[in-house]
Image (tube, coloured by chain):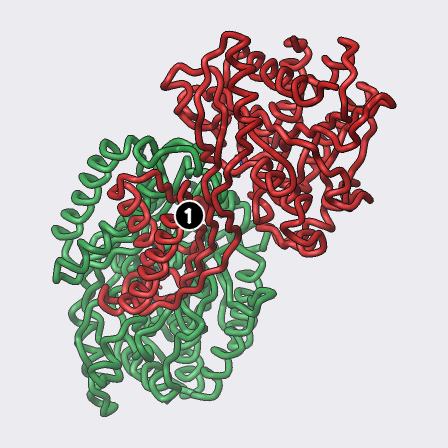
Chain colours: A red, B green
Amino acid sequence: SIDADRLLGRLRNLGQIGRDSDGRLVRLAGSDNDKAGRDAFVAWIRSAGLEVAVDRIGNIFGIWRDDANTNHTPVLLGSHIDTVINAGIYDGCYGVLSGLEVIETLQASGFVPANPIAVAAFTNEEGVRYAPDMMGSLVYAGGLPVEEALATVGTDGTTLGAELERIGYAGFEKPGFLKPHAYIELHIEQGPVLEREGMPIGAVENLQGISWQRVTIEGEANHAGTTPMSMRRDAGHAAARVVTFLRDRARRANTPTVATVGCMSFEPNAINVIPSRATFTVDLRDPDEGRLQAEEAALAAYLKELAAAEEVTISVERLARFQPVAFDKNIVELIEDAARKRGLASKRMTSGAGHDAQMIARIAPSAMIFVPSISGISHNPREHTPDADLVAGANVLLDVVTRLSAQ
Amino acid sequence: SIDADRLLGRLRNLGQIGRDSDGRLVRLAGSDNDKAGRDAFVAWIRSAGLEVAVDRIGNIFGIWRDDANTNHTPVLLGSHIDTVINAGIYDGCYGVLSGLEVIETLQASGFVPANPIAVAAFTNEEGVRYAPDMMGSLVYAGGLPVEEALATVGTDGTTLGAELERIGYAGFEKPGFLKPHAYIELHIEQGPVLEREGMPIGAVENLQGISWQRVTIEGEANHAGTTPMSMRRDAGHAAARVVTFLRDRARRANTPTVATVGCMSFEPNAINVIPSRATFTVDLRDPDEGRLQAEEAALAAYLKELAAAEEVTISVERLARFQPVAFDKNIVELIEDAARKRGLASKRMTSGAGHDAQMIARIAPSAMIFVPSISGISHNPREHTPDADLVAGANVLLDVVTRLSAQ
Ligand SMILES: NC(=O)NCCC(=O)O
Ligand SMILES: NC(=O)NCCC(=O)O
C-alpha cells in the first residue's frame, strides 16, 4: 500500500503554494504561482530519482525507467496542478501526487515493471486564464498544434507561450514524445454522486461533452435617468435575459444538461449609464452529443431572437468544444476489480468535469478513478475529500498500475 | 448676445482634455484628468479677471464683484466638469462655460449688476467614482457634512478627500460660503423630449427623485460541469433575475419610472465556476415620490423572495437617495419669457437627470434651462447638441441673468 502520510503531506504542502494576498489559492496556468507549484513538484520527482522531462507546452513528466523494462511505452499516470481562482487543494493535485506516490511505492517494494511508469502534470487543465481547458493534454494528444496553443491570448491579455518562457517551463520535448501504453487518472469527483450513494470509488466509464462560448452583446450607452424604458438598447439587460433563458431551459429539461454563466462584465460599468456592452461566457455540458448540439442550437436561436427584439448586436466566439468521450472498458474493469479486492464498493459513472484523461484517450487506452467530494463542492476553497477516501483511491491506483505493468 | 465662437471653442477645447489611451473622455471626479479640466477652467476664469475661490469639497468659483453691487449675495450660474466613463463633451461643461461666457459678455457690455455674479463648477456631479452624485453641490447646500463627503471611498478604493489633495483642489473656503441670491443652470436635456417636439428651449420646472442602491448576492462557488442545476446556489443567475425583474416591471408599468442596472460584477468570474458572488447597482427614478417609494419596496420584496427561492444571501447598500425637487416658479417664468423675447419656442418640463440645481434649490431660488440632445443620447461619446441650440440656450441664460441682476 502507498505511504499515506507522504501523499497527504505533499497534498497539503502543495495546497499552500500559490496563495494570493487574501489567502486564496490561485495557481492560474503560466503565472508566478503556477511556477511555484511546478517547482515543488519537480523537486519531489527529482528526490524520487525519476527522470524529469518538460515538453514545449510545459507538460512536466517524471519517468521511472529500468533496464529491465521489456516494453518501452510507459504506463502514464497524472493530472494537473494549475487551479481555478480561489480553488480547493485537491482538484488535479491529488492525481498528480498519487501518481508519484504509486511510483515511489513500487520502487520501494522492489517491483520490476514490464514498462516505464511515468507521472505527468499537464499544463492549463482548468482553462480559466487560457481557453480551451485541458490544453496541455490536448496538445500532447495531437488535438491542437503546439504553436497555436502557445499563441493563445488569456483573459488578462498575456500569451501562454510568453508566460511559460517567463516562468521557465517552455520545455524542449515534442508534445507526444512518450506514447503511453495506458493512462489512468485519479481525481476527486467534484460532484455529489459518490457521497450521496455512499460509494468510496467511482470507475469512470465516460465523460460528458463540453461547449464553451464567449458572447458579446453591443447595445447603446445612454443616460439612466433620461432614457425612457422603451427607447433603450441595453446590452446588460439582454445579457441577463440569456442567463435566465439558459437556467430556465436547463431546469425545465429534466435531462443532465448543465448550463453556467461564470464570467460577466458590463461596459462602461457606471451606475448611471445604460450598458453599451456586455460580455459573458456560456459553459454548456451534456453526456449526449446530440443533446449538446440541440442545446447549442437553442441558444443560437434565442440569441438571434433577442438581438432582434432588443435591437442589440450579438456575436459569439467559440472557446472550447469537446465531444463526450468513452473510456477504455478493460481499464474500467481493472478499476472495479482492484476496488473489490480492497473491499471498497465502486460505481460506474460519468465525469461531469473535463479531465486530461479525455484527451489522452485519443492516443492510449485510458480511464479514471474518482473519490467522493464532500457535498459535491469543488472549484471552491471548501472542496474536501476525507483522508481515508484519498488513501483508498491511491491504493486502487497502485493496484491497477501493478496489474497493467506486470511482466 | 454672447460670443458664440468663444463659447463653442472652449467647449471643444475642454472636450479634448482628459482622454484615455483609447481616446475616450474620462474625467472622473478627483482624477488626474479631472485636474487637467479644472486647471483649464481656472485659467479661463482668471483670464476673465474674476476672483477664484475653491471650497473644501473642491467646488470652484469664479466671482465677478463690483464696488457698485448693492446686493452682496451673488446670482450663481454653473454646473460641473467631471464626466462619466466614455462621456460626451456637453454634459455639465456646457453650463459651466456658458456661465463664464455670460459674465464676460456682461462685463464687456458695461452692464453694472445689482449683485455679484459667479460661476461654479461643482465637484463630483456624476457620482460614477464616488456616490452619491451631485456631491459637491449637496455639501455646498448643507445636505451632507463635508468631512463625510471627503471620506467617501470610491469604486477604485480611493478616498475623495485624498484625491482632491493630491490634485491640488482641496480648497479652504467653507462650503456654502457664498449664499446665492438665485441659481440658474443651463444644461443639455440628455433625453429625447425637446428634439421630438421641435422645441429649442426647455424651462425645467422640476426634477425626478433618484434612488441608487448597490446589491450584493452571495451564493456558493461550485463546479460548472459536475453540479446539477437543482443543487446550485448561483449568485450570477440570481443577479440576472433582478435585472429582468426591474426591466419587466418598469416596462409593464406605463409610468415614467426608469430602472437601470449599470454596474455588474461576478466572483470569482471564471468560466467553469458557478459565481459565488454578484454585485450590481440599481438606479431607480420617478418624478413622483410615492411611486418611487413603491418601486423601492417592490424591489426589496422581490429580493427577499429571490433569496429564499435561490438559497442566496442578499444585502443592499444605499448609495444615494434624493426626493423629487420643484424649481422656483418665478425663475421658470423668467426663462419662458426670455425665450419668447428671443423668438424661441419653449416647453415646461421635468428633468430626468440629477443636477446640481436640485441641491442648490435647498438654499436659493433655482431653476434650469435645457437645450435639445440629438436622439436623446447622453453619457455616450455620441452626445450632441447643434451649435445654434447651444448659442440660443446661452443667450436665454444671459437674458435671465440680466433680469435677475438689474439694479
Ligand atoms: N477537473 C476540472 O475541474 N477540470 C476543469 C475543466 C472543466 O471545467 O471541467
Ligand atoms: N446630468 C447628469 O448626467 N447627472 C449625473 C447624475 C445622474 O445620474 O443623473
Q: How many residues crowd around disc 1 within 10 Å: few (fewer than 14), some, or many (20 or more)?
A: some
Classify mark 1: helix, strand or loop.
Answer: helix
Residue corresponding to mark 1: A289
Does the rendering let one see residue B176? no
The N terminus of chain A, quarter of image: top right
Q: Quadrant of residue B353?
A: bottom left
Q: Amino acid at mark 1?
A: Glu
Chain letter for mark 1, please: A
Residue shown at 57% from the left, 49% from the top: A131
Q: Position of residue A386 (x, y in %)?
A: 50, 13
Residue B350 lies, with reference to residue A127, above or below; the image says below
Residue shown at 52% from the left, 45% from the top: B158
Q: Is residue B258 left or right of residue A213?
A: left
Residue B107 lies, with reference to residue B247, above or below; the image says below
Depth order, front residue of B26/A221 = A221
Q: Position of residue A172 (x, y in %)?
A: 82, 44
The C terminus of chain A, quarter of image: top right
Q: Quadrant of residue B348?
A: bottom left
Residue shown at 66% from the left, 52% from the top: A149
Residue shown at 59% from the left, 34% from the top: A83
Depth order, front residue of B141/B388 = B388
Depth order, front residue of A247/B131 = A247
Q: Position of residue A231 (x, y in %)?
A: 26, 69
